[in-house]
Image (tube, helix red, strand yellow):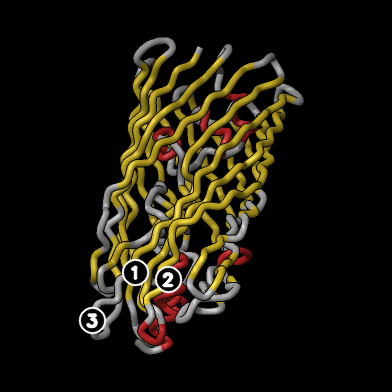
Amino acid sequence: MNKRTFVAAASAAACSLPVTAHATNGDQMMALSAAQAAMGGATVAQARDALAVMVNPAGIADLGMKEVRMDLGFGLLNPPREVNGQESDSNWYMMPSGAVAFNVNDRLFLGMGMGGIAGMGVNVADAMAAAGNQPVVTTKQVLRFTPAAAFKVTDALTLGASLNLVNQSLAMSLPGGGGNYVALPQNQQFGLGATVGATYKISPRWQAGLVYTTKTDVARMEYNTPSGRTSFDMDMPASLALGLSFKPMPGLQVEFDVKRYAFADVMKRIPVTNPPPGFPATLNFGWKDQTVYALGVKKDLGNKMAVSVGYNYGKSPFGAESVNMNLGSTAIVENHLSVGLTRKFSDKVSGTFAYTHAFSNELTSSVAPYNKIEIHQNQYNFNVSYQF
């Protein structure tokens, strides 16, 4: 295998993230629950459930519980993807998530949540057009635990903050230069970041939300190889989001969010310390910052039912010029369409189901070798809520 082809495979594999995440913007989850997914991820201004602690912690003050709200659920992700026409195996993945929020008093609210916040990956038997098989098999997953607090400064303004504790796991096996086959075993590292957010009631019909999440500093991924210890940084990007919610009439709510991910800071160029034979000294992924737009509409159907529709768009964080460095990345989905149904079973218990489809997108390298990647996604989410 020539050097150009190998570097493409190696860089792609290192960038491949686990498919334990939801429908994605880049490698970040579009939503963390059925209620959030049903709105296309538009949840910055108006909280949908207790999992707001992981989106905008200020939102937990708007959940309306007298004492406690709990949200538990799971999702199923089906992300068929191809590299040069070769299908990746393992196309079904389960994604659990959950959170709880407490009404301490009229001003103070506490909460905590846990779930996967990022991930994708591939399991391709023969990724490149060369003699023999060149499998690329990678998994990466990022799990976050978030304790949070919100404080009502006034009846209109609420401030919130959370601590983001992250566990990141990454493994890769891929063809290397000079006939080598590089296998970096599963490794896990912890990371730390924070989120600060606010909501502001402009009027009875309008509410705004603003949230900033710092870069999550993850400890260097370290692997023991025959040539010594190999290591590199793979942090989680900072993000800034603004949301605006509007209630044109009773029982109808519309929200529009804009979010910016600082991918260039963490996924553009990653130096590798002591790379094993055949592994590149620098992972030049070439990712750029990404702007995401989300629009959601929720309509009540009587006292016990509600239906939601959402749309989410984020341009791929890398272009055709970087395809060869991202063969294992499924980060190119751009358009998402969601629909959801919420049913109130009693005064305390309700359930939400959501379906999200990420439309097929493909990219072909603009430079030789002209590799092509393609993906679409189907996601099914179900959550049960208990509030009193």
Q: Nearer the viewer, mark 2 or mark 3?
A: 3
Amino acid type shown at disc 2: Ala
The residue depicted at 33 percent of the width and 32 percent of the height is 353
Whole-Å distance between the Cαs marked 2 and 3?
A: 19 Å
Residue carrying label 3: 132
Give the mark nearer the N terminus: 2 vs 3: 2
The reply to whether callout 2 and callout 1 are in contact (CB within 8 Å) is yes
Amino acid type shown at disc 1: Val
Q: Classify residue 218 by image quadrant.
A: bottom right
Mark 2 burial class by Cα count in 10 Å: few <14, some 14-19, many 20+: many
Give the SS element for disc 2: helix
The residue depicted at 42 percent of the width and 27 percent of the height is 72
Whole-Å distance between the Cαs marked 3 and 1?
A: 13 Å
Where residue 26 sits in the image (x, y, percent)?
47, 58
| Residue 355 falls left or right of residue 40 | left
Where residue 245 sits in the image (x, y, percent)?
55, 36
Quick check: 315 above or below 273?
A: above
The foreground one among 196 and 91 is: 91
The foreground one among 342 and 252 is: 342
The foreground one among 223 and 240 is: 223
Q: Classify residue 148 by image quadrant.
A: top right
Mark 1 burial class by Cα count in 10 Å: few <14, some 14-19, many 20+: many
- The answer, for residue 335, to whether it is visible in the render is yes
| Residue 239 falls left or right of residue 302 | right
Give the SS element for disc 3: loop
Q: Classify residue 352 by image quadrant.
A: top left
Where residue 1 sits in the image (x, y, percent)?
34, 87
Residue carrying label 1: 136
Give the SS element for disc 1: strand
